[in-house]
Structures are given as C-alpha cells and as structure tokens.
C-alpha cells in the first residue's frame, strides 16, 4: 500500500454516493441533479477530517474513506457540468474511484484514484534538495544512494509482500525501505564488516508488516542467486535494484572482487554484467531491473559509464523502459569541495557532475 500521501480523509456513506449516481437517469434534470450534488458536497465539507499518511480502513462496508480535497474537486466538476449527461459521467467516474480498485500487474497503486498518489514520481528528471535521513537512514557509508530511489522504485514496480533483490547492499538503504513499504528484501554485500553493521542498522527500522529483510555476505558475480532464493522457499523476485560502484571514483576496499578495483572501464562493465546475469536468473518474467549509476572523468575525458552499463544490460535481453536523470544538491562531497570543483571546472574546461542515472529495464 502506498503510504506517502499527506491528504486529509473523510468518511463517506457509499449508499449516499450511489444514490447520486442512480439519480442520473436518462430523464435527469440538470438543475435538480446539481441541487442534490451541492447538498452532498455540504455534508462532505462538514464531515470530520482524519489526517493520515494513508487512507484508514472504514468502519464498515457501508462507508469509504476518501481524500477530502480530491472528493470536493470531483464534486465541483460535476456541478460545473453543462449537461446532465456530462454530470452523470463525472459522477460515475467518481463513484468508481471511491468503490473499485484497479491496479496494474506491477504495483498496488489504485488507478481509479491515481490523483491521490501525489508523491509518486512520473517525470524523468528528479531534482532533490537533500537525502532522506529519517528513521534508520544515515549517510555513514560513503557512496550510498539516497533512500528516495528505492522508495520510488518499489512503489512503481512492486506489490506489498513481494521480494526485492539488491546485489550491492552497502549500508542497507534498500532493505530499510523494504521494511517501510512492506516488501521483503535480500541484499548481497561483499564486505563482511559492512554487512554486519548494515544488518544491525536495518534491524533498527520498525517492521510493522513483519517482512523479511536479510543481508548475506558474498560476491554478487559468484553467488548462486537461485540457490539463495531456494533456501528461503522462493523462485523469483519482483524487482532487482543495482547500485554498483561508479568504477574507481570511490574505492570501497582492497578485495579483487570489488568492482571499484576493476583495472579498466571495460573490465568494470564486464564484471558488472556478470552480476546482472546472476540477477536475471531470479527476476520474474517481465518484471523490473533498475540500475543507479553515474559517469566519470578519466585522464581529462568524460567517460559515459552510465550508458556503457545501460548497453551491457540491454545486451542481456532487457528492454529499456525509462532513463531517469537524478540531481542531488547537498551531497557531502559537494558541500565540502564545491568551490574547489568550480575552480577546476573553469580551469580545465569541463562541467561538474551534478547528476546520475536511473535506468529502468523490463526483464526478459
């Protein structure tokens, strides 16, 4: 269930709403219909308001909790209709949104009430002022991605109770969001010390829906993902979310298996491709694989690392669905060295990186 909306809700009598729809017969007179709708609108305006992050459950089947402002907006549209036929259309649509659920195969978003999901991003440019540091989220691990990314990916591409795989678990950001959104998650982390600390931090995030979140130690290029899932009674996951090192921009350790130690860009892409291949073995058919990555400079040349990785995933039979460009102003590195990098850019004739990519793929 989506839980990020800040709408205020009101309890509405289903029968009263249905009576408005039934009054829109072929012989309905627009003036009389407007009077009934106006009266119903007055009842909604006077109803007690419930502030909630998600629509609370109604007390019985005769009632439904609806977003107050959106309901009033819908009723105003009915009142503004110039014909009884058009008013009937708007009322029928409003009733469907209030009483019927229509979702896609990918998520739990009710498309009949799509306006309620105001925090679900649908544009390809994400400009974010700062990272989410609430709850267990912390920026202790250099290079971890912002929690808003797995949050958005899970809302768009998973249903409650489904499984998410993160082959580069790092600080456990994905698993913290799994707990918040009611998704099960498995992370694979190469560094045992990082895995231990991350598991402790993830365990500190409340888990109201009782989902499973686990970090295992291993090299994602070599881990048998099928066996990993089979040990937990699973065959597939709904979402694979990969946030690898951006080659050697940040060295995460001395291990040869660490992708940040790949000797060349080509070697990095090849090793990353091995992780993708392992992950695709357990991705459910036609479900989503997302890669978060940025570019790099090398010897004065801009290296389009993101697009090389994108093409590597495409070569494994995945269909590119979207490219999201994400900017974040207040990273620790940018705060501490902003002036220095501006000077270097002016002196060196280049532009400072202020973006990274989220490549969204549909698996084979």
Image (tube, grey):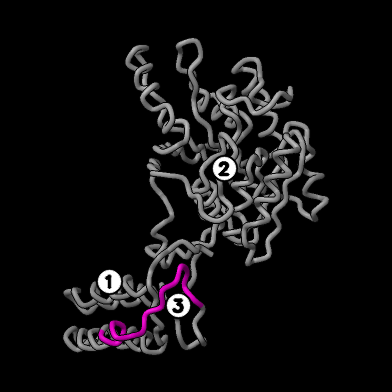
The mark that comes first in sequence, 1 or 3, is 1
Label 2 sits on residue: 362
Which x, y percent locates residue 287? 60, 48
- Residue 91, compared with residue 256, is above or below; it is below
* Residue segment shown in magenta: 42-56
Q: Measure the alpha-carbon separation of dots 1 and 3.
A: 17 Å
Please, what secondary structure does the residue beneath circle 3 have? helix
Classify residue 7 by image quadrant: bottom left
Q: Which mark is residue 73?
A: 1
Please, what secondary structure does the residue beneath circle 1 have? helix
Q: Are marks 2 and 3 in contact (CB under 8 Å)?
A: no
Q: Are marks 1 and 3 in contact (CB under 8 Å)?
A: no
In-front residue for pair 41/150? 150
Task: Please tell me whether residue 47 belongs to the stretch shown in magenta.
Answer: yes
Mark 3: few, some, or many residues within 10 Å (few <14, many ≥20)?
some
Which x, y percent locates residue 155? 52, 55
Mark 2: few, some, or many residues within 10 Å (few <14, many ≥20)?
some
Residue mark closest to the camera, 1 vs 3 = 1
The mark that comes first in sequence, 1 or 2, is 1
Label 3 sits on residue: 99
Which x, y percent locates residue 34? 20, 84
Q: Measure the alpha-carbon separation of dots 1 and 2.
A: 36 Å
Work out which residue is located at the far top of the displayed protein and give it. Answer: 299
- Residue 278, compared with residue 339, is above or below; it is below
- Residue 121, compared with residue 190, is above or below; it is below
Work out which residue is located at the far front of the displayed protein and give it. Answer: 336
Q: On the picture, is 331 further left or further right than 215?
A: left
Please, what secondary structure does the residue beneath circle 2 have? strand
Mark 1: few, some, or many residues within 10 Å (few <14, many ≥20)?
few
């Amino acid at each position: 269930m989506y839980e990020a909306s800040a709408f205020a809700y009101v309890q509405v009598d289903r029968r009263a709403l249905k009576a408005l729809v039934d009054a829109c017969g072929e012989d309905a007179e627009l003036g009389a219909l407007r009077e009934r709708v106006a009266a119903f609108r007055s009842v909604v305006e006077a109803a007690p308001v419930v502030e909630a992050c998600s629509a609370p459950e109604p007390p019985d089947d005769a009632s439904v909790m609806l977003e107050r402002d959106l309901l009033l907006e819908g009723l105003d549209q009915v009142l503004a209709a110039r014909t009884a036929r058009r008013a009937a259309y708007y009322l029928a649509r409003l009733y469907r949104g209030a009483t019927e659920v229509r979702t896609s195969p990918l998520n739990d978003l009710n498309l009949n009430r799509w306006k309620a999901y105001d925090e679900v991003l649908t544009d390809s440019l994400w400009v974010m002022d700062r990272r989410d540091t609430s709850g267990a989220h912390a920026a202790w691990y250099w290079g971890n991605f912002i929690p808003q990314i797995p949050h958005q990916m899970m809302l768009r591409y998973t249903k409650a109770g489904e499984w998410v795989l993160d082959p580069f678990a790092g600080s456990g950001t994905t698993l913290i969001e799994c707990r918040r959104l009611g998704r099960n998650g498995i992370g694979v982390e190469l560094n045992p010390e990082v895995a231990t600390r991350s598991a402790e931090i993830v365990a500190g995030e409340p888990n109201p829906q009782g989902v499973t979140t686990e970090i295992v130690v291993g090299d994602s290029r070599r881990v048998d993902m099928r066996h990993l899932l089979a040990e937990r009674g699973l065959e597939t996951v709904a979402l694979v979310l990969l946030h690898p090192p951006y080659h050697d921009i940040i060295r995460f350790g001395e291990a040869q298996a660490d992708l940040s130690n790949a000797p060349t860009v080509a070697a990095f892409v090849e090793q990353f491709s091995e992780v993708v291949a392992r992950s695709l073995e357990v991705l459910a058919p036609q479900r989503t694989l997302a890669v978060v990555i940025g570019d790099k400079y090398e010897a004065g040349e801009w290296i389009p690392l993101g697009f090389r990785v994108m093409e590597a995933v495409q070569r494994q039979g995945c269909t590119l669905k979207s490219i999201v460009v994400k900017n974040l102003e207040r990273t620790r590195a940018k705060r501490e060295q902003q002036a220095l990098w501006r000077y270097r850019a002016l002196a060196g004739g280049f532009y400072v990186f202020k973006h990274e990519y989220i490549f969204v793929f549909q698996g084979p």
